[in-house]
Image: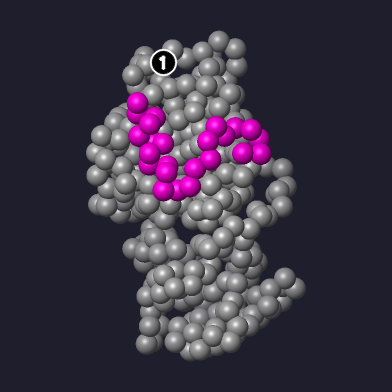
Amino acid sequence: MIVDDSAVVRQVLRQALSADPGIEVIGAASDPLFALEHMKRQWPDVIVLDIEMPRMDGLTFLRKLMAERPTPVVICSSLAARGSEAAMNALAAGAVSIITKPTAGLKQFLEDSANDIVHAVKAAARANPRRLVPPAAAPQPRLSADAVLPAASGLGSGANMVRTTERFVAIGTSTGGTQALEAVLTRLPAVAPPIVIVQHMPERFTAMFAERLNGLCAIEVREARHGDRITPGRALIAPGGKHMMVTRSGAQYTVEVVDGPLVNRHRPSVDVLFRSCAKFAGRNATGIIMTGMGDDGARGLKEMHDAGATTYAEDESTCVVFGMPKEAIRLGGVDHVLPLERIPEAIMQAARG
């Protein structure tokens, strides 16, 4: 279902999506109220939604959907520029992905971006907020964490690290992770153990996301900076467009924020973070993989597990998409599988060693 007040946008999107044999456009409406009338007769698998519309704006409609009948939504709006408040609000409300329309040359942009739009809709169809579906088939070969950080070996491996009182938790997540992280971090007390996080997000989104969480949480939450110390009561989120790694100096842990190639088609990559934890922290770290499409982080969590870390995966029953946790479980890198509401408890257990 396409919901946009521009007739041109509705026409071009309908043509682009209908051209793909795997997509059926069941309707196009000029505002959410017209869309709801149509959707009473046939409910869509995915909604492509504008933000600024008459009678009801897109964000209000999105929140209504997620409260009453959760449905994957792709936001397609000129208001949802990268790092904008509207974009962050859309992700926080449950949007699966965002396509930013330009303010000029709209028709040409939509025609040129047809493949990206089709891909976004197909990806959204696999992200059912109510239940889980199998992840997409494995993509073509791509770079692993080796492209950024060599694997640990011999005496330098994390399994041989001496235990210290400095322990921390590493979390990796993707699709559905903005809501999942909010649910977890807001339930932690100010004395929570140190946390490092990779959430797949574009550049500029992560700073605003961290700022929003910081206002909701008892712990400090902020975008990581190169050289930041990993300390109790603080969660560091990898900046969009950069990889984040953990390193050790004596008994203290800090983060490195570095450039590098895409790993598993992501930057930041969960595999890069988890490998650094395996290499430099071993049993002093706890690894948690949560909702997300694909398999980024699965191999890294296995490396953490093999280096002596305690590892967790979010249970299928609470994931938006069970791709990343499912692959980590399949590889044998998960000690415990927990629903989302029990992950804060696991984090606090990590603080007690």
In which quadrant of the rendered image does the C terminus lie? top left
Taking the image as shown, residue 206 lies to the left or right of residue 172, namely: left
Above-or-below relation of 288 to 178: above
Is 307 a magenta residue? no
In which quadrant of the rendered image does the N terminus lie? bottom right
Element marked by disc 1: loop
In percent of width and height, residue 276 lies at 50, 27
Quarter holding residue 92: bottom left
- Identify the residue at horizontal 51%, vertical 89% (top origin): 37
Instruction: Inspect the image, locate mark 1, and give the three-letter code of the amino acid beneath it.
Output: Arg
Q: Furthest residue to the top?
A: 155
- Identify the residue at horizontal 39%, vertical 36% (top origin): 347
Q: Is residue 36 visible?
A: yes
Quarter holding residue 226: top left
Q: Nearer the viewer, residue 174 or 325?
A: 325
Residue carrying label 1: 163
Quarter holding residue 346: top left
Above-or-below relation of 152 to 146: above
Is 350 a magenta residue? yes
In percent of width and height, residue 82 lies at 42, 60
Q: Is residue 58 visible?
A: no
Q: Nearer the viewer, residue 6 or 330?
A: 330
* Colour logic: one colour
In percent of width and height, residue 149 lies at 55, 28
- Identify the residue at horizontal 51%, vertical 19% (top origin): 158
Q: Which residues are magenta?
A: 329-352
- Identify the residue at horizontal 58%, vertical 79% (top origin): 43
Q: Furthest residue to the right?
A: 21
Above-or-below relation of 298 to 117: above
In percent of width and height, residue 59 lies at 39, 73
Above-or-below relation of 301 to 317: above
